[in-house]
Amino acid sequence: MLHKASAVKRILEREWMGFLMDLQMNAALGKGYRSKAQKIRVMSESWVGGNMFCPCCGNPHIFELKNNEPVADMKCDHCGGIFELKSKEGRVGKKINDGAYATMIERITSATNPELFVMQYSADYTVTDLILVPKFFFVPQIIEKRKPLAPTARRAGWTGCNILYAEIPQQGKISVIKNGIMKSQREVVENYARIKKLETANMNVRSWLFDVLNCVNRIGSNEFCLQEVYAYTEILQKRHINNHNVEAKIRQQLQFLRDKGFIEFLGGGHYKKRF
């Protein structure tokens, strides 16, 4: 009985799209690799490529890119969406380690920036959580520049970066798997389509929008007033030092969020969240 219960816990399966979703990564794929990072990369990419649908269009499968593409790990052959995967045992935390800082900044400001899958897995290589961060939620402010490698290092002077995951608005973290439970394909695709209403190619507009959205998210109540958002004026001013009319920018972003259906204007400077 204990053995059976352990197996059920270890191999979390969920009926989905007509077949059973096995959340257990194939540990055998990691054999032959010395570093844990390489093992997890191969195992996690194989799992996503073998199990995941496209969260952008609903295509039943996305496939691994075999040629070590510099930008992406996976692609959807229906909508052309490209995806990068970052995996971590246990909780992701506030930051995600990434590659070269200059390359990352160039990527997120271009049309080739991929969607990001963030995977959490347990010690026995079971997928516990999978989050999608849409590519249009990336702004330079959430990319942290690390210290260059020491002159004695093999890649002396190389400068890496971190993704400040905690600074991405909650709306930009679409849950695909949560606590071992797979969300339905329809729910994920609908969530992506709704969030896509916030997409803008203008990086300055994007930065302002998500900074104000983060401020609104920090307000505890579902209904809030303009003055509560104005309370973040000093913080926003420090993030946008060249802007000298922060309160006007706040009102502009609230209007945009209202027009896209994310908040409701109640009148008299009062709003209601529609997240």
Image (cartoon, rainbow, N blue to C red):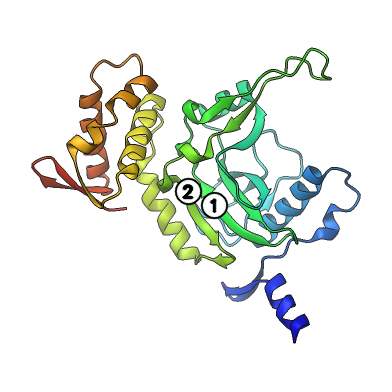
| Residue with the mark numbered 1 | 131
User: Amino acid under label 2?
Assistant: Lys
For label 2, the SS is loop
Where residue 120 appears, as percent x and y from the top left, is 63, 53
Number of numbered discs on residues: 2
Characterize the local packing of mark 1: few (<14), some (14-19) or many (20 or more) Cα atoms within 10 angstroms: some
Residue appearing at x 66%, y 19% in the figure: 147
Residue appearing at x 45%, y 64% in the figure: 186
Where residue 30 appears, as percent x and y from the top left, is 84, 53
Q: Quadrant of residue 248?
A: top left
Whether residue 269 is situated above or below residue 62 in the rendered picture: above
Q: Residue furthest bottom?
A: 1
Residue appearing at x 59%, y 43% in the figure: 82
Residue appearing at x 68%, y 55% in the figure: 49
Q: Quadrant of the N terminus?
A: bottom right
Q: In the image, is 8 to the left or to the right of 229?
A: right
Q: In the image, is 83 to the left or to the right of 8?
A: left
Residue 173: numbered disc: 2
Residue nearer the viewer, 109 or 247: 247
Q: Are marks 1 and 2 in contact (CB under 8 Å)?
A: yes
Q: In the image, is 271 to the left or to the right of 146?
A: left
Whether residue 7 is situated above or below residue 166 in the rendered picture: below
Q: Quadrant of residue 98?
A: top right
Where residue 128 appears, as percent x and y from the top left, is 62, 61
Characterize the local packing of mark 2: few (<14), some (14-19) or many (20 or more) Cα atoms within 10 angstroms: many
User: Amino acid under label 1?
Assistant: Ile
For label 1, the SS is strand
| Among the two numbered marks 1 and 2 on one chain, the one whose residue lies closer to the N terminus | 1
Where residue 158 appears, as percent x and y from the top left, is 72, 19
Whether residue 159 is situated above or below residue 92 in the rendered picture: above
